Image (cartoon, helix red, strand yellow):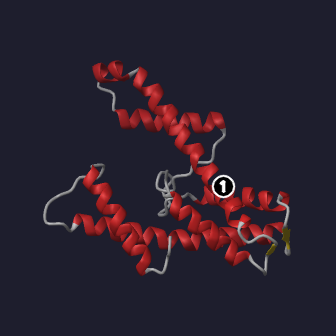
Amino acid sequence: MLLPKEFVNYLSRQVLKRLSPTYVDVMDPASGPELVGKVILDELEVEDKLNEDVRELLSQYAEYMRREGISYQEMFKKIKTQMIRERKIVRASGRDTGDSMKLSRDKINDVSHKVVAALRKARGVRLRKDQNEVRLEIVRSITEILTLEDKADRAARLKIRSQKREISEGTEEYGILHKRYYADELKKLGVDV
């Protein structure tokens, strides 16, 4: 998943906090963040499922690709792009589309539409402003929060690269260090996941 679930929970709480009471009224403060978090997680899981489908497809052709000297990464990108078009999925990964953040601008916009739709359908939630104004505030909020997340992620990666010995990304040690440094950097930025 592009964003850790703990961070998605934080993100959903903050988005709702920024929306209340100017943009929305939420009668049950506990159910609001759950609703927003579910929409975000569901959207991120769509791309995770797509990646899994691409890996499964490529595993069937692994021997052929090895024999023909075809790059796994190149084929992964090509097949994923084709499946995104066929399934009409909005690409979640911002870095794949040239955005600096983990989520693409298109995905943030897509999520904002779905969050507004979910808020409109939810009992105990009332929009106080026009749907589009609420949606634009959601986009602003998510973008600002993801900017902080990106700073924390970059700082954690920098700390790992500055170790005396090289630690390869993808290893268990890298994962453990990244998780620890990432949490420390988020705390420094005032993000309490």
**Residue 159 appears in which quarter of the rendering?**
bottom left
Please say whether residue 93 is visible from this viewpoint. yes
Query: Left or right: where does residue 60 sit relative to residue 44?
Result: left
Query: Left or right: where does residue 177 sit relative to residue 73?
Result: left
Q: Residue at x 33, y 32 (%)?
A: 71
**Residue 164 appears in which quarter of the rendering?**
bottom left
Instruction: Please tell me which residue lies in front, 152 or 86.
Output: 152
Q: Residue at x 48, y 81 (%)?
A: 190
Residue 118 position within the rendered picture, expressed as x and y whole percent measured from the top left: 78, 57
SS class, disc 1 = helix
Q: Which residue is mark 1?
A: 38
Residue 141 position within the rendered picture, expressed as x and y whole percent measured from the top left: 63, 73
Q: Residue at x 37, y 37 (%)?
A: 73
Residue 3 position within the rendered picture, expressed as x and y whole percent measured from the top left: 50, 58
Instruction: Please tell me which residue lies in front, 96 or 46.
Output: 46
How would you rate the neighbour count of disc 1 (Cα within 10 Å): few for under 14, some for 14-19, many for 20 or more?
some
Q: Give the amino acid at mark 1.
A: Lys
Residue 95 position within the rendered picture, expressed as x and y whole percent measured from the top left: 46, 56
- Tell me: residue 33, above or below residue 49: below
